Image (spheres, helix red, strand yellow):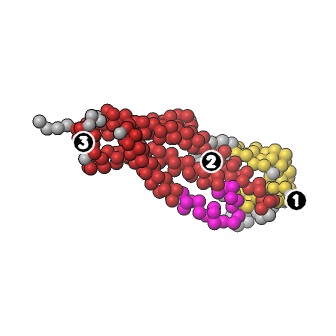
């Protein structure tokens, strides 16, 4: 009976989680589809972005699944009469809640790992950006230029060496362009470090070469999460365990009472 109750509750939670993940991934695919359809976006960049979207979707699914799954399981068993039958056999509300807590603890363990991984990404968007940039270094082996979305960098192969390029300024006629061998953003996207830089300006006509350039005061296009990854992971784990227990236990006890 214990294994039956545990399997039934876990199955309901998994079903809810799969539905949430399917809906979230369907919405994420709309954002990812232009990356997949473009022949200039490297496959590595699409994979990095897809991993970030998948972690975000899974984090939300694990927060919703325990509470909703346990509630649906109790509602179905009560409507079918299984709950009263179990109570008549001595399977009281406390044992029922204990099995729900055990199933929710598995979800909490998975949520702890997923939220910690996504929390690192969310608190350090610069690392995600650097991974997107690094995915374009295969330009020479791909034998075609590649673009890095979100950053606007174009990778070119110059004499067998991958180099990144971007125009200076905005508008139909840019003020110039720069070429660099390496680029690395700070974790909060507030600064950018370039190495092996060559810059060319139109007006006045200036060409310059630098070994190391650091650009500060950038306005980040993604706001870093202010919550530390460990705190985020622990909060999500506790959120998986807490909500299903009190409502389910109160609901079950209410159904167990009999009028004199």
Left or right of 184 in this view: 48: left
Residue at the left extreme?
260
Q: Secondary structure at mark 3?
A: helix
* Residue under the image location 73 percent in, 46 percent down: 184
Residue 72, percent from left and from top = 34, 48
The residues bearing labels 3 and 2 have C-alpha atoms spaced at a distance of 57 Å
Q: Which mark is residue 220?
A: 2
> Does the rendering let one see residue 170?
no
Q: In terms of image quadrants, where is residue 158?
A: bottom right
Q: Is residue 42 magenta?
A: yes
Dots 3, 1 in contact, CB < 8 A: no
When the figure is inspected, residue 153 is found, relative to residue 10, above or below; the finding is below
Q: Is residue 227 magenta?
A: no
* Residue under the image location 28 percent in, 40 percent down: 86
Q: Secondary structure at mark 2?
A: loop
Q: Secondary structure at mark 1?
A: loop
Q: Which mark is residue 159?
A: 1
Residue 250, percent from left and from top = 28, 37
Please tell me how crowded label 1 is: few (under 14), some (14-19), or many (20+) other residues with Cα within 10 Å. Answer: few
Q: Which residues are magenta?
A: 28-46
The residues bearing labels 3 and 1 have C-alpha atoms spaced at a distance of 77 Å
Q: Sequence-wise, which precedes: disc 3 or disc 1? A: 3
Please tell me how crowded label 3 is: few (under 14), some (14-19), or many (20+) other residues with Cα within 10 Å. Answer: some
């Amino acid at each position: 009976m214990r294994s039956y109750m545990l399997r039934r509750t876990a199955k309901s939670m998994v079903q809810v989680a799969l539905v949430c993940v399917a809906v979230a991934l369907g919405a994420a695919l709309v954002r990812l589809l232009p990356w997949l359809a473009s022949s200039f976006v490297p496959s590595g960049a699409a994979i990095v972005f897809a991993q970030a979207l998948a972690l975000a979707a899974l984090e939300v699914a694990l927060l919703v699944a325990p509470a909703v799954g346990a509630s649906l399981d109790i509602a179905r068993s009560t409507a079918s009469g299984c709950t009263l039958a179990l109570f008549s056999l001595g399977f009281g509300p406390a044992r029922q809640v204990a099995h729900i807590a055990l199933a929710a603890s598995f979800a909490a363990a998975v949520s702890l790992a997923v939220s910690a991984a996504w929390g690192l990404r969310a608190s350090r968007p610069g690392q995600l950006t650097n991974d997107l940039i690094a995915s374009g270094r295969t330009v020479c082996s791909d034998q075609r230029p590649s673009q890095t979305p979100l950053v606007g960098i174009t990778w070119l192969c110059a004499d067998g060496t991958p180099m990144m390029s971007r125009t200076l300024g905005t508008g139909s006629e840019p003020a110039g362009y720069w070429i660099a061998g390496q680029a690395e953003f700070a974790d909060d996207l507030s600064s950018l470090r370039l190495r092996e830089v060559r810059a060319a300006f139109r007006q006045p006509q200036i060409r310059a070469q630098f070994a190391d350039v650091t650009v500060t005061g950038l306005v980040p296009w993604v706001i870093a999460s202010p919550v530390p990854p460990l705190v985020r992971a622990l909060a999500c784990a506790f959120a998986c365990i807490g909500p299903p227990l009190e409502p389910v236990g109160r609901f079950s006890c209410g159904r167990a009472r009999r009028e004199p």
